Image: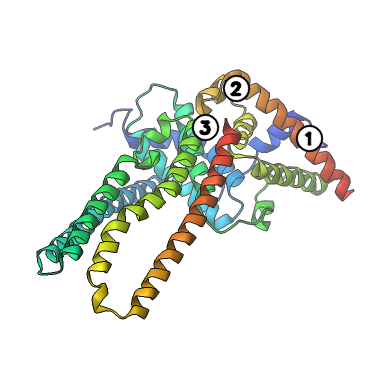
Amino acid sequence: MPRPPSHPADLYNEVARTYGGALERLARAYEPDSDRRRDLLQEIHVALWRSLARFDQRCSMRTWVYRVAHNVATSHVIRPKARTPAFVEADDLDSLPQPIDEEERFDHQRTLDRVYALIRELPPVDRQVMLLYLEEVDAATTAEITGLSAGNVSTRVHRIKQLLAQRFRERGAGHG
Amino acid sequence: MDESPQDVHRLWQQQPREENRMSTDDVRAKAERLERRVKRWKITGGLLFAVIIAAELWQIGRPNPLLERTGDLLTIAAFVYMAYWFRRYAPVDAVPQALGRTGSVDFYRSRLERQRELASRRWRYLAVFIPGVTLSLFGRAMERSVEQNAAIAVFGVLLFVVVAWVIGRTGRQMQHELDELA
């Protein structure tokens, strides 16, 4: 007998298929340690499973998923624990995109490596806004997910982009 | 930055997926385990509370000095207050759907406020036990040596000083983060 489309398992499968990649990137941005990142990702998926049974369609599925994911990740970050290393692990470097050209691959790795490192330095709210920006979530949806006003979101995105560009320049000059 | 914003977006979205993904059955099993654990914790907490109250009531029923029995009664009142507070200020994410209904900034603020409240209330938790424990200790003070009574008093004062210092520091940290959010 076919299950109704709103069955939690069907909803969860749909969510995992659509947002699985974004959730992995989000977990990577919050947690540099690979073991703890796996735990965080599992925690997000379990929270989604539990919450989807109570999804009331008062907001879009996308908003719901990002709220759950960011809220779980924020709890993970502010939970008292041993300090995590402020650098990206070798595991991460291996899992970055594989462009045809080795030199190009190295450049891409370095860029993403820097983006992750810089995102992890941002305060939680700016980190959320930045991640949603990178996932190409529009300002109105970001406002709905975070609870900030759309104007506030735009201002923060602008400021964060400037900050990131500035940090890249500083580090580039430092390494150059 | 060598790349344009479009390049960064493209790079970001083209990252490969993790190899070790959880299956739906794994997620379901973990969620069910978590639900069972939460339920178990609630039952264990309730039982522990009942045992403590029963032990204190038994103490009150014994032919102890009046001061000590009054202390036990006040200790019961302190436990009841603490249990009420824990229920009243349960964390936002204790309810699964709250994670999806609460905007992430509000959620973050509520977590910080809860931590700050917990830090300040911790002092109150300790404070509500002071009358009961002090009376209970005084009830038997005559049976102990002066050195033992002095050691107990010094330990009590030190404990309160350290707790007050830790709470003050945590509260200031939380308030600083809340100020930044405003």
Above or below, A22 against A86 in this view is above
Instruction: Report crowding for label 3: few under 14, some 14 to 19, many 20 or more residues within 10 A (C-alpha).
Output: many
The location of residue A154, given as percent across then percent down, is: 65, 22
User: Residue at the location (25% across, 55% down)?
Assistant: B45
Give the number of the mark in front: 3 or 1: 3
Instruction: Report crowding for label 2: few under 14, some 14 to 19, many 20 or more residues within 10 A (C-alpha).
Output: few
Above or below, B159 against A69 in this view is below
Instruction: Report crowding for label 1: few under 14, some 14 to 19, many 20 or more residues within 10 A (C-alpha).
Output: some
Image quarter of residue B143: bottom left
Which residue lies under the disc numbered 1? A165
- Mark 2 and mark 1: Cα distance apart in space: 21 Å
Image quarter of residue B94: top left
Q: Secondary structure at mark 1?
A: helix
Q: Secondary structure at mark 2?
A: loop
Q: Secondary structure at mark 3?
A: helix
Which residue lies under the disc numbered 3? B105
Labels 2 and 1 in the same subunit: yes
- Mark 3 and mark 2: Cα distance apart in space: 17 Å
- Mark 3 and mark 1: Cα distance apart in space: 25 Å
Above or below, A164 against B37 in this view is above
Which residue lies under the disc numbered 2? A138
Give the number of the mark in front: 2 or 1: 1
